[in-house]
Amino acid sequence: MHLRFSAVCDDARQTPTGRIDVHGVYHDLAAPGFPAKQERLVVVLVLEWDRGDHGRYLFKADLEDDLGNVSLTVEGETEVHQSPPDQPPARSPLIMPIEEVIFPHAGQYTFRVKVKGTTLEGPGIYLMEAAEGQASA
């Protein structure tokens, strides 16, 4: 199992054909001071499963700073259906909108995804302090 795709963005939607439309991907935010609050962000993860994986799996995504302190946790469950050998491996597209995210301080934050006893490094956001007129967080 591995993380096929990950992003932090303004919005994402799965289309009827199974594609994911992702809008406003970003990697950093500026805030006039800390703690800083981001009103809304969307985390997109696509987990690609091993051929033998099937059934229900719990997952957890922790937003951690560079010292390992957790700012927030998102938990969920996904159903994995075994793919035929002539088809791509099973994938779970996870689109998770999160409201009012608090960033305690400037620096690097990374989503760490835990599933099946494995931790996968997901998307990151770098928070920086900016002059008041230039803030985006």
Image: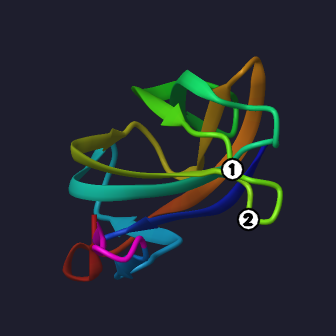
Query: Can the viewer see residue 59 in this picture?
Result: yes
Secondary structure of residue under mark 2: loop
Question: What's under tag 1, amino acid-wise?
Answer: Ser
Callout 2: few (<14), some (14-19), or many (20+) C-alpha neighbours within 10 Å?
Answer: few
Q: Is residue 31 above or below residue 109?
A: below
Which residue appears at 45% of the width and 58% of the height?
44
**In x, y percent, where is residue 47?**
63, 49
Contact? badges 2 and 1 (CB < 8 Å): yes
**In x, y percent, where is residue 96?**
33, 48
Secondary structure of residue under mark 1: loop
Q: Report the quarter where the C terminus lies.
A: bottom left
Which residue appears at 44% of the width and 78% of the height?
25
Callout 1: few (<14), some (14-19), or many (20+) C-alpha neighbours within 10 Å?
Answer: some
Which residue appears at 67% of the width and 41% of the height?
82
Residue 87, label in figure = 2
User: Relative to the observer, which residue lies in front, 11 or 21?
Assistant: 21
Which color scheme did the rendering employ for the protein?
rainbow
Q: Which residues are magenta?
A: 11-18
**In x, y percent, where is residue 95?**
36, 54
Q: Does residue 26 belong to the magenta stretch?
A: no
Residue position for label 1: 83
User: Relative to the observer, which residue lies in front, 33 or 51?
Assistant: 51
Examine the image and state in which quarter residue 116 appears: top right
Q: Is residue 110 above or below residue 29?
A: above
Question: What's under tag 2, amino acid-wise?
Answer: Gln
Residue 27, label in figure = none
